[in-house]
Amino acid sequence: MRLIVGLLKPNSGDIQIFGEKLTRKKEQLWQLRQKIGFLFQNPDDQLFAPTIEEDVGFGARNMKLPESKVNQRVEWALKAVNLYDFRNESPFNLSWGQKKRACLAGLLVLQPKLLILDEPFANLDFRSILDHLKILESLRKQNKMTILFTTHNMFFVEHWADKMLVLSNGNKVFEGTPVEGLNLPEIKELIGSYDQIEEFIKKSRKSEV
Amino acid sequence: MRSIILPFRQQNEETPLSKIHPLARIIIPFILVIPTLLISDYFLIITILLLTLLTNLFFRLKTIKVLSTTKAILPFIIIITIFIPLYYGNTIYLQVFIGIQITIYQEGLAFAILLFLRIFTAIFVFLSYFSALSYSEFIEAITKAHLPSMFVGSIVILLHYIPILATSNRKILEAQELRGKKVTSYWLKLKAHAFIMGKSIVSNMERSEKLYESLKMRGFSGKITFAPRGIKKMDLVILFFFLSLEIIFVIIIDLETIYLGVIQFCIP
């Protein structure tokens, strides 16, 4: 993921993104980063400004947009993630789920075409996962954003993703639909499944009886 | 969390000083403190201390919190000043024999008192005005001051990491205590923190790298831009008022005569 957004330089080969070859030129990278929003797994790695509003507006101000436009975008992004009422709060006063949504709003002001999410549902309870899914689904449908996410939880791959890519030790081992991938024994073996966990627990508890 | 570790007020907490531009509020303590550091005048230092105390009470700033923070720094000021009378000066003021001969020199004592008052006043004045600033206003002020962007960026990231570092330190310490480590005294706590700090710094280095990457992803090119707010004429008037007040105290008014007059009036 870091390669796609130009944070890392490939050791060999080229990266093509939106039909263009990715170079290390600053201008091209900034143009690209306005089209791609990259959400870090840990929100504390992204939030830095004194208030949510200022953090969310950071990217828009770097785009040199007029202040009225910045405010418009910030308002839209905060409303999109249901954090408008928290705009004057310090990011440190928010819960983990709210912090993650604030980070997402910080990317939305750039109005990207592609959202890259690193473990978006990690450390969230079911209620927060549902809130996140609703927001992401609305962005996908209404704003036509493509979402690329990494996860260790196959539930989201099975039920939410259209395509699936499995990497192991930096190598691609599968590319296709989740239905195809999750039914392959070698993929099941590699990534594990709830079935295996369930089987283990049942066996273990049975032996006690 | 940030408000506990750093001397800033909460974001939504309004004070009468909030109407003054943050940059002006940062400059005021400098106007008040710099002359006290340059001129050896006890009466000027006491006047600035009293003026700040009055400002604290009048604008309902967090006087108790400021005094309690200043109190926490007091032992360090005492350590810096307490030995000066023992080795600086020629005129003997007092000689005491407690197993060894201790000589207190008059010049050293005067200098130690002056230094103590200077440091105490500087800390009290800065903390008082900083307590009226929110973290957001502080960043706004240093951005508006046109300081080098590298400096501003470093301060923003540093302030971002102080609470994170403190929290991760506290968690490690709690985990150690849960596994039987006994931290019974302040000294042991300090030692434990110092020991953990090294580990915390290393693990947070990686995080600061990620923060830098996330800033780059949002167009960071060395300059941090937040919502700008212009300096009004009123802010300049306030700065001019404090500057004039300082000039009056230093040049026009003879503070010594006033204080002695007040003392004579109170104790005839």
Image (tube, coloured by chain):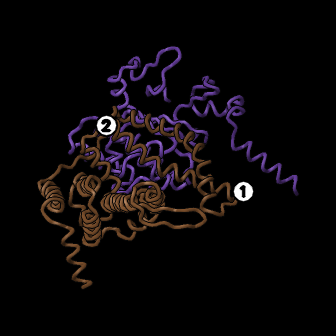
The percent position of residue A113, horizontal first and vertical second, equals 37, 33
Chain letter of the residue beneath label 2 in the structure image: B
Instruction: Please name whichever residue, A188 or A11, is drawn nearer the observer in this view of the structure.
Output: A11
Say which residue appears at 59% left-offset and 33% top-offset: A178
Q: Name the residue under label 2.
A: B149
Say which residue appears at 34% left-offset and 33% top-offset: B222
Chain letter of the residue beneath label 1 in the structure image: B
Q: Mark 1 points at which residue?
A: B179
Q: Residues within 10 Å of mark 1 (few under 14, many from 20)?
A: few
Q: In which quarter of the image is residue B37?
A: bottom left
Q: Chain B is drawn in which colour?
A: brown
> Which residue type does callout 1 highlight?
Arg
B20 horizontally vs B178: left or right: left
Q: In this view, does B165 lie above or below A25?
A: below
Q: Residue furthest bottom?
A: B268
Q: In this view, does B178 lie above or below B152?
A: below
The percent position of residue B251, horizontal first and vertical second, equals 14, 59
Q: Can the viewer see residue B98 in this picture? A: yes
Instruction: Please name whichever residue, B65 or A23, is drawn nearer the observer in this view of the structure.
Output: B65
Q: Residue A28 carries which label?
A: none
Marks 1 and 2 sit apart, C-alpha to C-alpha, by 45 Å
Dot 1 falls on a residue whose secondary structure is loop
Mark 1 or 2 closer to N-term?
2
Q: In this view, does A79 lie above or below A175?
A: below
Q: Chain A is drawn in which colour?
A: purple
